[in-house]
Amino acid sequence: MPSPPHIKKPFPPVQDADTSRLIVKVQQCIDDYGMLRPEDRVLVGVSGGPDSVALVHVLSWLRCRYAIDLGIAHLDHGLRPDAAAQETAWVKGLAEDLDVPFFSSRLGTFPGHGSLEAWLRTQRYDFLEQTAAQHGFSKIAVGHQANDNAEAVLLHLLRGSGMRGIAGIPPIRGNRIIRPLIRVTRTEILTCLDRLGIDWLHDPTNMDVRFDRNRVRHQLIPLLEKDYTANLVQILNRTASICFEEDRWIDDQLAPLLARSVAARNSTSLRLRVDSLVHAPRPVQRRIIRNALRMWLGDLQRFNANHIENIAALLPDDQRHRRLHLPRRIEAERTVTDLYFRRFPGHCRGRPQAAIPAEPVEFTHVIETAEDLPVVIEIPEAGLRLAFRIEHAIAHAIDYEMVRSRGPQRVFFDLNRLTFPLLIRTPKPGDRISPFGLQGTQKLKKLFIDHKIPKPERSRVPLVIGGDTVLWVVGVRRSGLAVVDEQTSKALRIEAQTIDRVNDMKQL
């Protein structure tokens, strides 16, 4: 294993022509896709291999140009215990030499079900996302390069993918994960590191042909380059770039139809309006279904083209009340008006089901005065409706203990002690509540942790706010403010109900 690099002083100007061309290529890629903005904090995933080592060095050279800060994250995959400690120490030494913060973790044992390769990928991105969130990094940079992209295109072709798969590895995903080396070949990277005398670690698992990607890398691509075209990597990357641009353009054109088609969405269910889709061409139906599922689930892992085709086949009227069982404990049902997807909780083949990420959302609703009551507010982003109404003569009609204590779906407040306007909005950093029955205040972040609400779902939990005070974290906990007592003459009753349940009742 090479010894750690020792770069204890600022990098000298890059004079090597090949390295200069590589840096210009990376700059152009960053600029073309708007990967970086001034004051971005970029967490770089570094395994110690040549790609990630080159990536962190190039970004170090470009730090001043883009006015960014860097950090290094290293994950021990647990595949080679004998070398893991040395590799972690090596990458930590690299972080120290570059004068950037270092973060590391180690994976647990593979559960033994499904694809090891897919499991490692999921765990790796989970680690990067969690580290970035905990330490305030706005971007995550990973070292995928042009050869990786060519391999991905071939793998997707072999699995029967459509345009989205042939588009390869996206240069930027969710405006958060960036791949600045995606236009640079493996040969260019190795040449750069060699010319500059920069060490890197060799990972023998990259030679393990049990992994599909390694078989494509070491067996299929050399065969195609030898017998068909030596420019295979460039050709596949050009094809991927064309497909990526066209795929993104088609999504932009269909965005209004996607918005019309999604009737409701929350962490456990998704409804698509049949009337928005049934007369659309089949390619449009497939794309809207795919994009809606991806928006709901965060990704389409374990879904293939046959699953999407079978879902689209439920759209005609003669398919009413048919159901499909899909991956990840999801069931699709054709109701009278909708395609209804529900996700069942529990375990899958003896292992806990992975949490499904959801995109952060933002919503705001206002009730200006008590004269605006009663009112029902639909919050499709949370899959809820909130009903606000006034209860009179409450002192004689309602048990005090019941209305004082927190309830998951219904709360009461003394109307005369409330400050209007009432605001219903998404949580924000720094929000606090004075929980009923407790002294002092508590950060909502801790409240969510205590109630085991996953991070991706927290932005979907509505807050009811009076003045500038959190009255109710809907479905979680009420505050100790404006409590109903013997002096209460009017109470505000707020009840939360899932939109799905309301729609189900309408269809009975």
Image (cartoon, rainbow, N blue to C red):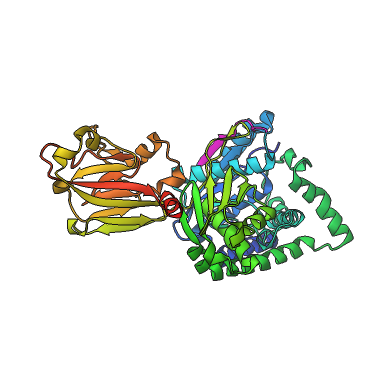
What residue sits 79% from the left and 61% below the top?
A: 232
Q: Specify the quadrant that holds the N terminus.
A: top right
Given residues 149 and 476, the one toward you in this image is: 476
For this orientation, the residue located farthest to the left is 487
Q: Left or right? Give the position of 41 relative to 184.
A: left
For this orientation, the residue located farthest to the front is 508
Taking the image as drawn, is residue 484 in sight? Answer: no
Given residues 220 and 288, the one toward you in this image is: 288
How many numbered dots are placed on residues in this image?
0
What residue sits 84% from the left and 59% below the top?
A: 225
Location of residue 149 in the rendering, given as x and y in whole percent from the top left corner:
69, 57
Q: Is residue 169 above or below residue 87?
A: below
Q: Is residue 177 magenta?
A: no
Location of residue 475 in the rendering, given as x and y in whole percent from the top left corner:
35, 42
Dividing the picture into quadrants, the one containing residue 2 is top right
Location of residue 19 in the rendering, given as x and y in whole percent from the top left corner:
67, 59
What residue sits 46% from the left and 54% below the top?
A: 507
For this orientation, the residue located farthest to the right is 227
Given residues 216 and 330, the one toward you in this image is: 330
Given residues 260 and 64, the one toward you in this image is: 260
Q: Is residue 38 above or below residue 213?
A: below
Location of residue 379 in the rendering, given as x and y in whole percent from the top left corner:
37, 55
Q: Left or right? Give the position of 231 relative to 279.
A: right
Q: Which residues are magenta?
A: 102-112
Taking the image as drawn, is residue 299 in sight? Answer: yes
Q: Is residue 111 magenta?
A: yes
Q: Is residue 252 above or below residue 56?
A: below
Q: Left or right? Give the position of 406 relative to 160.
A: left
